[in-house]
Image (cartoon, rainbow, N blue to C red):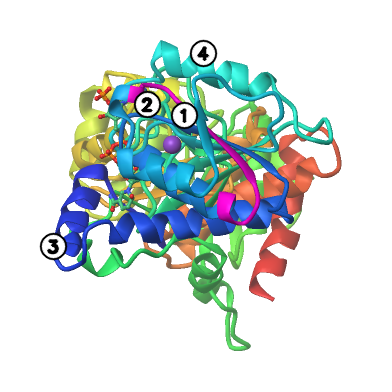
Amino acid sequence: MRPAWRVADVRAAEEALMARLPEGTLMQRAAAGLARRCALILEQVYGAHVTLLIGAGNNGGDALYAGAILARRGAAVTAVVLDPAKVHREGLTALTQAGGRAQDQPPRTIDLVVDGIVGIGAKGGLRSGAATTLHRTLERRGRHGQRPTMVAVDVPSGVDVDTGDVPGKAVRADVTVTFGCLKPAHVVGPAAPLAGEVELVDIGLRPWLRADPAVLVPDRADIAQALPKHRPTDEKYTRGVVGIATGSMTYPGAAIMSTAGALAGPTGMVRYAGTAREYVVQAHPSVIATDRITDAGRVQAWVVGSGLGTDETAATAVRTVLATSLPVVLDADALNLLVGGTMADLMRGRSAPMVLTPHDREFARLAGEEPGNDRVGAAQKLAAHTNAVVLLKGDRTIVATPSGTAYANPTGSAALATGGTGDVLAGLLGSLLAGGLRPEVAAVTAAYLHGLAGREAARHGPVTAPDVADALRPVIEHLTR
Ligand SMILES: NC(=O)C1=CN([C@@H]2O[C@H](COP(=O)(O)OP(=O)(O)OC[C@H]3O[C@@H](n4cnc5c(N)ncnc54)[C@H](OP(=O)(O)O)[C@@H]3O)[C@@H](O)[C@H]2O)[C@@H](O)CC1
Ligand SMILES: [K+]
Protein backbone atom coordinates (compact mmCIF):
# COMPACT_ATOMS: atom_id res chain seq x y z
CA MET A 1 0.00 0.00 0.00
CA ARG A 2 1.26 3.46 -0.79
CA PRO A 3 0.36 5.90 2.00
CA ALA A 4 -0.49 9.60 1.59
CA TRP A 5 -0.22 12.13 4.42
CA ARG A 6 -2.00 15.41 5.14
CA VAL A 7 -0.24 18.78 5.09
CA ALA A 8 -0.17 19.21 8.90
CA ASP A 9 1.57 15.83 9.28
CA VAL A 10 4.05 16.67 6.52
CA ARG A 11 4.81 20.00 8.22
CA ALA A 12 5.39 18.28 11.58
CA ALA A 13 7.74 15.73 10.03
CA GLU A 14 9.56 18.43 8.07
CA GLU A 15 10.10 20.43 11.25
CA ALA A 16 11.51 17.45 13.14
CA LEU A 17 13.83 16.51 10.30
CA MET A 18 14.98 20.06 9.56
CA ALA A 19 16.03 20.55 13.16
CA ARG A 20 18.82 18.03 12.52
CA LEU A 21 20.05 19.27 9.16
CA PRO A 22 21.87 22.35 7.89
CA GLU A 23 19.43 24.98 6.65
CA GLY A 24 18.23 24.53 3.11
CA THR A 25 19.16 20.82 2.90
CA LEU A 26 15.63 19.64 2.21
CA MET A 27 15.07 22.19 -0.51
CA GLN A 28 18.33 21.15 -2.16
CA ARG A 29 17.27 17.49 -2.05
CA ALA A 30 13.88 18.41 -3.50
CA ALA A 31 15.40 20.56 -6.24
CA ALA A 32 17.91 17.86 -7.21
CA GLY A 33 15.09 15.32 -7.65
CA LEU A 34 13.01 17.80 -9.59
CA ALA A 35 15.87 18.76 -11.92
CA ARG A 36 16.71 15.09 -12.53
CA ARG A 37 13.16 14.36 -13.66
CA CYS A 38 13.03 17.46 -15.88
CA ALA A 39 16.31 16.40 -17.51
CA LEU A 40 14.89 12.92 -18.17
CA ILE A 41 11.83 14.42 -19.83
CA LEU A 42 13.91 16.80 -21.96
CA GLU A 43 16.35 14.03 -22.96
CA GLN A 44 18.82 16.73 -24.05
CA VAL A 45 19.08 19.54 -21.50
CA TYR A 46 21.56 21.65 -23.48
CA GLY A 47 19.62 24.16 -25.60
CA ALA A 48 16.20 23.29 -24.14
CA HIS A 49 13.82 26.14 -23.25
CA VAL A 50 12.56 25.85 -19.69
CA THR A 51 10.10 28.24 -18.05
CA LEU A 52 9.60 28.34 -14.30
CA LEU A 53 6.32 29.71 -12.91
CA ILE A 54 7.30 31.12 -9.54
CA GLY A 55 4.89 31.87 -6.69
CA ALA A 56 5.40 33.38 -3.25
CA GLY A 57 6.80 30.48 -1.22
CA ASN A 58 9.19 27.55 -0.96
CA ASN A 59 7.42 25.77 -3.80
CA GLY A 60 8.85 28.50 -6.00
CA GLY A 61 12.19 28.05 -4.21
CA ASP A 62 12.33 24.39 -5.26
CA ALA A 63 11.62 25.39 -8.85
CA LEU A 64 14.29 28.12 -8.85
CA TYR A 65 17.04 25.82 -7.53
CA ALA A 66 16.05 23.11 -10.02
CA GLY A 67 16.12 25.77 -12.74
CA ALA A 68 19.65 26.70 -11.65
CA ILE A 69 20.77 23.07 -12.05
CA LEU A 70 19.25 22.92 -15.55
CA ALA A 71 20.76 26.30 -16.50
CA ARG A 72 24.22 25.06 -15.49
CA ARG A 73 23.68 22.15 -17.87
CA GLY A 74 23.01 24.55 -20.73
CA ALA A 75 19.23 24.99 -20.75
CA ALA A 76 17.76 28.44 -21.43
CA VAL A 77 15.85 28.95 -18.19
CA THR A 78 13.37 31.79 -17.62
CA ALA A 79 11.65 32.39 -14.30
CA VAL A 80 8.29 34.11 -14.58
CA VAL A 81 7.98 35.65 -11.13
CA LEU A 82 4.38 36.31 -10.11
CA ASP A 83 5.11 38.64 -7.21
CA PRO A 84 8.70 39.96 -7.16
CA ALA A 85 8.22 41.23 -3.59
CA LYS A 86 7.62 37.69 -2.32
CA VAL A 87 10.00 35.59 -4.42
CA HIS A 88 12.42 33.11 -2.78
CA ARG A 89 15.49 35.41 -2.84
CA GLU A 90 18.29 32.85 -2.52
CA GLY A 91 16.66 30.66 -5.14
CA LEU A 92 16.42 33.53 -7.58
CA THR A 93 20.05 34.48 -6.99
CA ALA A 94 21.12 30.88 -7.60
CA LEU A 95 19.21 30.88 -10.88
CA THR A 96 20.66 34.13 -12.20
CA GLN A 97 24.18 33.13 -11.15
CA ALA A 98 23.73 29.93 -13.16
CA GLY A 99 22.80 31.96 -16.26
CA GLY A 100 18.99 31.95 -15.94
CA ARG A 101 16.89 35.10 -16.05
CA ALA A 102 13.70 36.45 -14.53
CA GLN A 103 10.87 38.36 -16.19
CA ASP A 104 7.18 38.95 -15.66
CA GLN A 105 5.84 37.34 -18.87
CA PRO A 106 6.40 33.88 -20.35
CA PRO A 107 8.95 33.77 -23.19
CA ARG A 108 7.96 32.85 -26.78
CA THR A 109 9.43 29.37 -26.86
CA ILE A 110 8.83 26.84 -24.09
CA ASP A 111 9.68 23.13 -24.15
CA LEU A 112 9.04 22.49 -20.48
CA VAL A 113 7.13 24.38 -17.79
CA VAL A 114 7.94 23.93 -14.10
CA ASP A 115 4.90 24.83 -11.99
CA GLY A 116 6.28 26.34 -8.77
CA ILE A 117 3.30 28.61 -8.18
CA VAL A 118 2.12 27.04 -4.94
CA GLY A 119 2.58 23.76 -3.07
CA ILE A 120 1.37 22.55 0.27
CA GLY A 121 0.88 26.17 1.41
CA ALA A 122 -2.02 26.55 -1.03
CA LYS A 123 -5.36 28.04 -0.11
CA GLY A 124 -8.21 27.96 -2.62
CA GLY A 125 -7.95 27.81 -6.42
CA LEU A 126 -5.28 29.65 -8.37
CA ARG A 127 -5.46 33.41 -7.87
CA SER A 128 -6.32 35.45 -10.94
CA GLY A 129 -2.79 36.75 -11.59
CA ALA A 130 -1.36 33.23 -11.48
CA ALA A 131 -4.21 31.89 -13.62
CA THR A 132 -3.63 34.52 -16.31
CA THR A 133 0.12 33.79 -16.45
CA LEU A 134 -0.61 30.06 -16.63
CA HIS A 135 -3.06 30.63 -19.47
CA ARG A 136 -0.50 32.64 -21.47
CA THR A 137 2.18 30.05 -20.81
CA LEU A 138 -0.02 27.27 -22.15
CA GLU A 139 -0.47 29.18 -25.43
CA ARG A 140 3.29 28.96 -26.11
CA ARG A 141 4.92 26.17 -28.10
CA GLY A 142 8.25 24.35 -27.92
CA ARG A 143 11.18 24.47 -30.34
CA HIS A 144 9.54 21.81 -32.51
CA GLY A 145 6.06 23.35 -32.37
CA GLN A 146 4.99 20.93 -29.65
CA ARG A 147 2.85 21.59 -26.58
CA PRO A 148 5.16 22.27 -23.61
CA THR A 149 5.42 19.49 -21.03
CA MET A 150 4.05 20.59 -17.64
CA VAL A 151 5.93 19.44 -14.53
CA ALA A 152 4.26 20.34 -11.23
CA VAL A 153 6.41 20.87 -8.15
CA ASP A 154 5.00 18.86 -5.22
CA VAL A 155 1.35 19.27 -6.30
CA PRO A 156 -0.38 20.82 -9.31
CA SER A 157 -1.01 24.42 -8.21
CA GLY A 158 -4.62 25.23 -7.42
CA VAL A 159 -5.69 21.93 -5.86
CA ASP A 160 -6.73 21.41 -2.25
CA VAL A 161 -3.86 19.25 -1.01
CA ASP A 162 -5.67 17.52 1.87
CA THR A 163 -8.95 16.68 0.15
CA GLY A 164 -8.15 16.43 -3.57
CA ASP A 165 -10.79 19.02 -4.31
CA VAL A 166 -10.25 21.47 -7.17
CA PRO A 167 -11.98 24.64 -5.99
CA GLY A 168 -11.15 26.81 -9.02
CA LYS A 169 -8.53 27.10 -11.76
CA ALA A 170 -5.65 24.65 -11.42
CA VAL A 171 -2.61 23.36 -13.27
CA ARG A 172 -2.97 20.15 -15.30
CA ALA A 173 0.40 18.44 -15.06
CA ASP A 174 1.95 15.72 -17.19
CA VAL A 175 4.24 14.83 -14.32
CA THR A 176 4.20 15.83 -10.65
CA VAL A 177 7.43 15.53 -8.70
CA THR A 178 6.56 15.36 -5.01
CA PHE A 179 8.79 15.19 -1.96
CA GLY A 180 8.92 13.01 1.13
CA CYS A 181 5.53 11.36 0.74
CA LEU A 182 2.35 11.36 -1.33
CA LYS A 183 -0.41 13.77 -0.33
CA PRO A 184 -4.16 13.08 -0.71
CA ALA A 185 -4.44 15.38 -3.76
CA HIS A 186 -2.24 12.95 -5.71
CA VAL A 187 -4.63 10.08 -5.21
CA VAL A 188 -8.21 11.25 -4.53
CA GLY A 189 -10.84 13.56 -5.95
CA PRO A 190 -10.71 15.65 -9.12
CA ALA A 191 -7.14 16.72 -8.23
CA ALA A 192 -5.70 13.22 -8.77
CA PRO A 193 -5.97 13.17 -12.58
CA LEU A 194 -4.48 16.70 -12.69
CA ALA A 195 -1.26 15.38 -11.15
CA GLY A 196 -0.49 13.18 -14.17
CA GLU A 197 2.29 10.71 -13.42
CA VAL A 198 3.49 11.19 -9.85
CA GLU A 199 7.17 10.72 -8.94
CA LEU A 200 8.02 10.57 -5.25
CA VAL A 201 11.48 11.94 -4.38
CA ASP A 202 12.94 10.64 -1.14
CA ILE A 203 14.18 13.56 0.98
CA GLY A 204 14.51 11.55 4.21
CA LEU A 205 11.11 12.53 5.59
CA ARG A 206 9.52 9.10 5.90
CA PRO A 207 10.87 8.08 9.36
CA TRP A 208 9.53 11.35 10.75
CA LEU A 209 5.99 10.83 9.50
CA ARG A 210 4.52 9.55 12.75
CA ALA A 211 0.80 10.19 12.21
CA ASP A 212 -1.49 7.66 10.54
CA PRO A 213 -1.67 8.21 6.79
CA ALA A 214 -4.77 10.01 5.52
CA VAL A 215 -5.33 7.44 2.82
CA LEU A 216 -3.73 4.26 1.43
CA VAL A 217 -3.42 3.35 -2.23
CA PRO A 218 -3.24 -0.35 -3.12
CA ASP A 219 -0.88 -1.50 -5.83
CA ARG A 220 -0.79 -4.62 -7.99
CA ALA A 221 1.14 -6.66 -5.46
CA ASP A 222 -1.36 -5.89 -2.68
CA ILE A 223 -4.22 -7.09 -4.85
CA ALA A 224 -2.40 -10.19 -6.06
CA GLN A 225 -1.66 -11.06 -2.44
CA ALA A 226 -5.24 -10.43 -1.29
CA LEU A 227 -6.79 -12.71 -3.89
CA PRO A 228 -7.49 -16.20 -2.50
CA LYS A 229 -5.16 -18.90 -3.85
CA HIS A 230 -6.90 -22.04 -4.98
CA ARG A 231 -5.60 -25.32 -3.62
CA PRO A 232 -6.09 -28.77 -5.15
CA THR A 233 -8.11 -29.80 -2.08
CA ASP A 234 -10.59 -26.93 -2.50
CA GLU A 235 -14.27 -27.57 -2.86
CA LYS A 236 -17.06 -25.08 -3.37
CA TYR A 237 -17.44 -24.09 0.27
CA THR A 238 -13.73 -23.56 0.84
CA ARG A 239 -13.66 -21.32 -2.22
CA GLY A 240 -16.83 -19.63 -1.03
CA VAL A 241 -20.45 -19.77 -2.11
CA VAL A 242 -22.08 -16.43 -2.76
CA GLY A 243 -25.80 -15.66 -2.72
CA ILE A 244 -27.18 -13.04 -5.10
CA ALA A 245 -30.50 -11.38 -4.25
CA THR A 246 -30.76 -8.72 -6.93
CA GLY A 247 -32.94 -7.85 -9.94
CA SER A 248 -36.63 -8.36 -10.50
CA MET A 249 -39.08 -9.11 -13.29
CA THR A 250 -38.85 -5.41 -14.12
CA TYR A 251 -35.04 -5.27 -13.96
CA PRO A 252 -33.70 -8.75 -14.80
CA GLY A 253 -30.53 -7.20 -16.25
CA ALA A 254 -29.31 -6.21 -12.79
CA ALA A 255 -29.60 -9.83 -11.65
CA ILE A 256 -27.74 -11.09 -14.73
CA MET A 257 -24.93 -8.56 -14.35
CA SER A 258 -24.38 -8.98 -10.61
CA THR A 259 -24.33 -12.75 -11.13
CA ALA A 260 -21.78 -12.29 -13.94
CA GLY A 261 -19.60 -10.27 -11.55
CA ALA A 262 -19.87 -12.98 -8.89
CA LEU A 263 -19.03 -15.77 -11.35
CA ALA A 264 -15.88 -13.94 -12.43
CA GLY A 265 -14.60 -13.83 -8.84
CA PRO A 266 -12.84 -16.61 -6.96
CA THR A 267 -16.12 -18.10 -5.80
CA GLY A 268 -16.85 -21.83 -5.83
CA MET A 269 -20.51 -21.46 -6.64
CA VAL A 270 -23.19 -18.81 -7.14
CA ARG A 271 -26.73 -19.14 -5.82
CA TYR A 272 -29.43 -16.76 -6.99
CA ALA A 273 -32.64 -15.97 -5.11
CA GLY A 274 -35.29 -13.73 -6.62
CA THR A 275 -37.95 -13.18 -9.21
CA ALA A 276 -35.51 -12.88 -12.12
CA ARG A 277 -34.36 -16.44 -11.62
CA GLU A 278 -35.34 -17.77 -15.07
CA TYR A 279 -33.41 -15.01 -16.79
CA VAL A 280 -30.37 -15.65 -14.61
CA VAL A 281 -30.27 -19.38 -15.29
CA GLN A 282 -30.71 -18.77 -19.00
CA ALA A 283 -27.74 -16.38 -19.01
CA HIS A 284 -25.62 -18.40 -16.53
CA PRO A 285 -26.58 -22.10 -16.51
CA SER A 286 -24.15 -22.95 -13.67
CA VAL A 287 -26.12 -20.84 -11.18
CA ILE A 288 -28.45 -22.58 -8.71
CA ALA A 289 -31.57 -20.42 -8.53
CA THR A 290 -34.61 -20.21 -6.28
CA ASP A 291 -37.42 -17.70 -5.85
CA ARG A 292 -36.82 -16.95 -2.19
CA ILE A 293 -33.76 -16.17 -0.10
CA THR A 294 -34.93 -18.55 2.61
CA ASP A 295 -34.90 -21.43 0.06
CA ALA A 296 -31.49 -20.62 -1.37
CA GLY A 297 -29.46 -23.17 0.63
CA ARG A 298 -26.09 -22.53 2.22
CA VAL A 299 -24.17 -19.40 1.17
CA GLN A 300 -21.27 -17.58 2.83
CA ALA A 301 -22.11 -14.01 1.79
CA TRP A 302 -25.04 -12.14 0.25
CA VAL A 303 -25.27 -9.42 -2.37
CA VAL A 304 -28.56 -7.58 -2.20
CA GLY A 305 -30.01 -4.54 -3.88
CA SER A 306 -29.55 -3.59 -7.49
CA GLY A 307 -32.69 -3.81 -9.61
CA LEU A 308 -34.80 -5.05 -6.69
CA GLY A 309 -37.02 -1.98 -6.74
CA THR A 310 -38.27 -0.55 -3.46
CA ASP A 311 -41.58 -2.38 -3.02
CA GLU A 312 -42.50 -4.72 -0.16
CA THR A 313 -40.87 -7.77 -1.88
CA ALA A 314 -37.64 -5.82 -2.15
CA ALA A 315 -37.84 -4.69 1.49
CA THR A 316 -38.42 -8.30 2.58
CA ALA A 317 -35.35 -9.41 0.63
CA VAL A 318 -33.12 -6.81 2.31
CA ARG A 319 -34.57 -7.56 5.75
CA THR A 320 -34.08 -11.32 5.29
CA VAL A 321 -30.47 -10.89 4.27
CA LEU A 322 -29.76 -8.49 7.13
CA ALA A 323 -31.28 -10.98 9.57
CA THR A 324 -28.59 -13.55 8.71
CA SER A 325 -25.21 -13.53 10.41
CA LEU A 326 -23.38 -13.50 7.06
CA PRO A 327 -21.30 -10.82 5.34
CA VAL A 328 -23.50 -8.65 3.12
CA VAL A 329 -23.03 -6.27 0.21
CA LEU A 330 -25.79 -3.65 0.11
CA ASP A 331 -26.04 -2.01 -3.28
CA ALA A 332 -28.36 0.37 -5.15
CA ASP A 333 -32.03 -0.17 -4.14
CA ALA A 334 -30.97 -1.76 -0.85
CA LEU A 335 -29.30 1.55 0.00
CA ASN A 336 -32.51 3.43 -0.78
CA LEU A 337 -34.45 1.02 1.43
CA LEU A 338 -32.00 1.61 4.26
CA VAL A 339 -32.78 5.30 4.53
CA GLY A 340 -34.39 5.89 7.92
CA GLY A 341 -36.70 3.45 9.68
CA THR A 342 -36.18 -0.03 11.02
CA MET A 343 -33.89 -1.16 8.22
CA ALA A 344 -31.17 1.21 9.48
CA ASP A 345 -31.60 -0.13 13.04
CA LEU A 346 -31.35 -3.68 11.78
CA MET A 347 -28.09 -2.78 10.15
CA ARG A 348 -26.54 -1.09 13.15
CA GLY A 349 -27.40 -4.14 15.26
CA ARG A 350 -25.41 -6.56 13.06
CA SER A 351 -21.92 -7.80 13.86
CA ALA A 352 -21.20 -9.59 10.55
CA PRO A 353 -19.34 -7.51 7.94
CA MET A 354 -21.30 -5.18 5.67
CA VAL A 355 -20.20 -3.22 2.64
CA LEU A 356 -22.28 -0.35 1.24
CA THR A 357 -21.56 0.62 -2.35
CA PRO A 358 -23.18 4.03 -2.97
CA HIS A 359 -22.64 6.41 -5.86
CA ASP A 360 -23.01 10.09 -5.02
CA ARG A 361 -26.83 10.28 -5.17
CA GLU A 362 -27.28 7.16 -3.07
CA PHE A 363 -24.69 8.51 -0.66
CA ALA A 364 -26.61 11.79 -0.34
CA ARG A 365 -29.84 9.95 0.46
CA LEU A 366 -28.14 7.72 3.03
CA ALA A 367 -25.99 10.35 4.71
CA GLY A 368 -28.46 13.22 4.39
CA GLU A 369 -25.84 15.27 2.52
CA GLU A 370 -23.73 15.09 -0.64
CA PRO A 371 -20.20 13.69 -0.29
CA GLY A 372 -19.00 17.26 -0.95
CA ASN A 373 -15.40 18.37 -1.40
CA ASP A 374 -13.84 15.93 1.06
CA ARG A 375 -14.77 12.52 -0.32
CA VAL A 376 -12.50 10.60 2.03
CA GLY A 377 -13.89 12.41 5.08
CA ALA A 378 -17.45 11.90 3.89
CA ALA A 379 -16.97 8.15 3.35
CA GLN A 380 -15.30 7.79 6.76
CA LYS A 381 -18.19 9.57 8.43
CA LEU A 382 -20.83 7.35 6.81
CA ALA A 383 -18.81 4.22 7.63
CA ALA A 384 -18.60 5.20 11.29
CA HIS A 385 -22.30 6.04 11.38
CA THR A 386 -23.48 2.80 9.74
CA ASN A 387 -20.84 0.49 11.20
CA ALA A 388 -20.24 -0.72 7.63
CA VAL A 389 -17.40 -0.48 5.16
CA VAL A 390 -18.34 2.20 2.63
CA LEU A 391 -17.24 1.99 -0.99
CA LEU A 392 -17.96 5.43 -2.44
CA LYS A 393 -17.89 5.13 -6.22
CA GLY A 394 -16.08 7.67 -8.35
CA ASP A 395 -13.17 8.17 -10.70
CA ARG A 396 -11.02 7.39 -7.63
CA THR A 397 -13.31 5.13 -5.65
CA ILE A 398 -12.87 5.49 -1.88
CA VAL A 399 -13.16 2.62 0.60
CA ALA A 400 -13.57 3.65 4.25
CA THR A 401 -13.88 1.49 7.36
CA PRO A 402 -15.90 2.25 10.51
CA SER A 403 -12.62 2.68 12.42
CA GLY A 404 -11.48 5.40 10.01
CA THR A 405 -8.98 3.76 7.64
CA ALA A 406 -9.41 4.97 4.06
CA TYR A 407 -8.20 3.64 0.72
CA ALA A 408 -8.22 5.25 -2.73
CA ASN A 409 -8.48 3.08 -5.81
CA PRO A 410 -5.92 3.98 -8.48
CA THR A 411 -7.41 2.02 -11.41
CA GLY A 412 -10.54 4.11 -12.05
CA SER A 413 -11.63 4.42 -15.64
CA ALA A 414 -14.13 6.68 -17.38
CA ALA A 415 -15.22 3.52 -19.20
CA LEU A 416 -17.03 2.41 -16.04
CA ALA A 417 -19.48 5.31 -16.16
CA THR A 418 -22.08 3.19 -17.92
CA GLY A 419 -25.22 1.40 -16.71
CA GLY A 420 -24.86 -1.99 -15.06
CA THR A 421 -21.14 -1.85 -14.24
CA GLY A 422 -22.04 -1.21 -10.59
CA ASP A 423 -23.95 -4.51 -10.57
CA VAL A 424 -20.84 -6.32 -11.80
CA LEU A 425 -18.81 -4.69 -9.02
CA ALA A 426 -21.31 -5.71 -6.32
CA GLY A 427 -21.32 -9.33 -7.54
CA LEU A 428 -17.53 -9.50 -7.60
CA LEU A 429 -17.36 -7.98 -4.13
CA GLY A 430 -19.83 -10.58 -2.82
CA SER A 431 -17.72 -13.33 -4.30
CA LEU A 432 -14.61 -12.02 -2.52
CA LEU A 433 -16.50 -11.76 0.78
CA ALA A 434 -17.73 -15.33 0.37
CA GLY A 435 -14.10 -16.30 -0.27
CA GLY A 436 -13.29 -15.11 3.24
CA LEU A 437 -11.66 -11.73 2.58
CA ARG A 438 -12.06 -9.06 5.26
CA PRO A 439 -14.69 -6.57 4.11
CA GLU A 440 -12.30 -3.67 3.47
CA VAL A 441 -9.86 -5.94 1.65
CA ALA A 442 -12.71 -7.35 -0.44
CA ALA A 443 -13.93 -3.82 -1.26
CA VAL A 444 -10.46 -2.52 -2.19
CA THR A 445 -9.74 -5.62 -4.27
CA ALA A 446 -13.09 -5.50 -6.07
CA ALA A 447 -12.69 -1.79 -6.92
CA TYR A 448 -9.15 -2.36 -8.20
CA LEU A 449 -10.04 -5.36 -10.39
CA HIS A 450 -13.23 -3.71 -11.65
CA GLY A 451 -11.21 -0.62 -12.70
CA LEU A 452 -8.64 -2.75 -14.51
CA ALA A 453 -11.44 -4.65 -16.25
CA GLY A 454 -13.00 -1.34 -17.34
CA ARG A 455 -9.69 -0.25 -18.86
CA GLU A 456 -9.16 -3.63 -20.52
CA ALA A 457 -12.69 -3.58 -21.99
CA ALA A 458 -12.20 0.00 -23.23
CA ARG A 459 -9.25 -1.11 -25.38
CA HIS A 460 -11.76 -2.72 -27.73
CA GLY A 461 -14.13 0.25 -28.08
CA PRO A 462 -17.18 1.57 -26.22
CA VAL A 463 -17.81 -0.42 -23.07
CA THR A 464 -20.95 -2.14 -21.81
CA ALA A 465 -21.40 -3.86 -18.44
CA PRO A 466 -21.13 -7.38 -19.98
CA ASP A 467 -17.76 -6.32 -21.49
CA VAL A 468 -16.53 -5.37 -18.02
CA ALA A 469 -17.71 -8.69 -16.58
CA ASP A 470 -16.02 -10.57 -19.45
CA ALA A 471 -12.77 -8.68 -18.92
CA LEU A 472 -12.59 -9.56 -15.22
CA ARG A 473 -11.45 -13.15 -15.67
CA PRO A 474 -8.42 -12.40 -17.88
CA VAL A 475 -7.52 -9.44 -15.66
CA ILE A 476 -7.55 -11.63 -12.54
CA GLU A 477 -5.69 -14.39 -14.33
CA HIS A 478 -3.00 -11.97 -15.48
CA LEU A 479 -2.65 -10.46 -12.03
CA THR A 480 -2.26 -13.76 -10.21
CA ARG A 481 -0.01 -15.44 -12.78
N1 LIG B 1 7.38 20.12 3.53
C1 LIG B 1 8.58 19.69 3.18
O1 LIG B 1 9.07 18.75 3.74
C2 LIG B 1 9.32 20.36 2.09
C3 LIG B 1 8.74 21.37 1.36
N2 LIG B 1 9.31 21.90 0.29
C4 LIG B 1 8.57 22.78 -0.59
O2 LIG B 1 7.94 23.81 0.12
C5 LIG B 1 6.58 23.91 -0.29
C6 LIG B 1 5.77 24.58 0.74
O3 LIG B 1 6.27 25.88 0.83
P1 LIG B 1 5.52 27.03 1.61
O4 LIG B 1 5.18 26.57 2.94
O5 LIG B 1 6.40 28.22 1.52
O6 LIG B 1 4.18 27.21 0.82
P2 LIG B 1 3.85 27.34 -0.78
O7 LIG B 1 3.06 26.17 -1.14
O8 LIG B 1 5.07 27.64 -1.56
O9 LIG B 1 2.87 28.58 -0.80
C7 LIG B 1 3.36 29.78 -0.36
C8 LIG B 1 2.49 30.94 -0.73
O10 LIG B 1 1.73 30.83 -1.90
C9 LIG B 1 0.67 31.77 -1.85
N3 LIG B 1 -0.59 31.12 -2.20
C10 LIG B 1 -1.41 30.40 -1.39
N4 LIG B 1 -2.45 29.94 -2.05
C11 LIG B 1 -2.32 30.36 -3.32
C12 LIG B 1 -3.12 30.20 -4.48
N5 LIG B 1 -4.25 29.49 -4.45
N6 LIG B 1 -2.71 30.77 -5.64
C13 LIG B 1 -1.56 31.50 -5.66
N7 LIG B 1 -0.77 31.68 -4.58
C14 LIG B 1 -1.14 31.12 -3.42
C15 LIG B 1 0.65 32.31 -0.47
O11 LIG B 1 1.33 33.56 -0.47
P3 LIG B 1 0.71 34.92 0.05
O12 LIG B 1 0.62 35.75 -1.20
O13 LIG B 1 -0.62 34.63 0.65
O14 LIG B 1 1.74 35.43 0.99
C16 LIG B 1 1.46 31.30 0.30
O15 LIG B 1 2.06 31.86 1.45
C17 LIG B 1 6.22 22.49 -0.60
O16 LIG B 1 5.07 22.38 -1.38
C18 LIG B 1 7.47 22.03 -1.32
O17 LIG B 1 7.43 22.44 -2.67
C19 LIG B 1 10.63 21.45 -0.16
O18 LIG B 1 11.43 22.58 -0.39
C20 LIG B 1 11.40 20.60 0.78
C21 LIG B 1 10.70 19.91 1.83
K1 LIG C 1 3.10 23.52 -7.68
Callout 4 touching callout 3 (CB < 8 Å): no
Q: Magenta span has 94?
A: no
Q: Percent position (x, y) of residue 259?
A: 63, 47
**In terms of sequence position, does the residue under pointer 4 or pointer 1 come before the other?**
4
Q: Disc 1 beta carbon < 8 A from ligand 1? A: no
Mark sitting earlier along the chain (4/3): 3
Q: Which residue is mark 1?
A: 359
Distance between mark 2 and mark 3 Cα atoms: 45 Å
Alpha carbons under labels 3 and 1: distance apart: 45 Å
Residue receiving disc 4: 132
Disc 1 + disc 2, Cβ < 8 Å: yes
The amino acid on which the numbered mark 2 sits, given as a three-letter code, is Phe
Measured in 3D between alpha carbons, the distance from the residue under mark 4 to the one under mark 1, in whole angstroms, is: 36 Å
Image quarter of the C terminus = bottom right
Name the residue that disc number 2 marks. 363
Q: Where does the magenta region start and end?
A: 71-84
> Where 417 falls versus 197 (above or below)?
above
Vertical placement of 339 versus 38: above or below?
A: above
Tell me the distance, in whole angstroms, between the alpha carbons under discs 1 and 2: 6 Å
Tell me which numbered mark, 3 or 1, is placed earlier along the sequence.
3
Residue displayed at 29% across by 27% down: 86
Which secondary structure lies at badge 3? loop
How many other residues sit within 10 Å of disc 1, few (<14), some (14-19) or many (≥20)?
some
Mark 4 vs 2, N-terminal side: 4
Looking at marks 2 and 3 on the same chain, the residue that comes earlier in the sequence is marked by 3
In the depicted structure, whether residue 440 falls above or below residue 196: below
Q: Residue at x 48, y 16 (%)?
A: 131
Q: Residue furthest bottom?
A: 233
Task: Name the residue beneath numbered marker 3.
Answer: 19
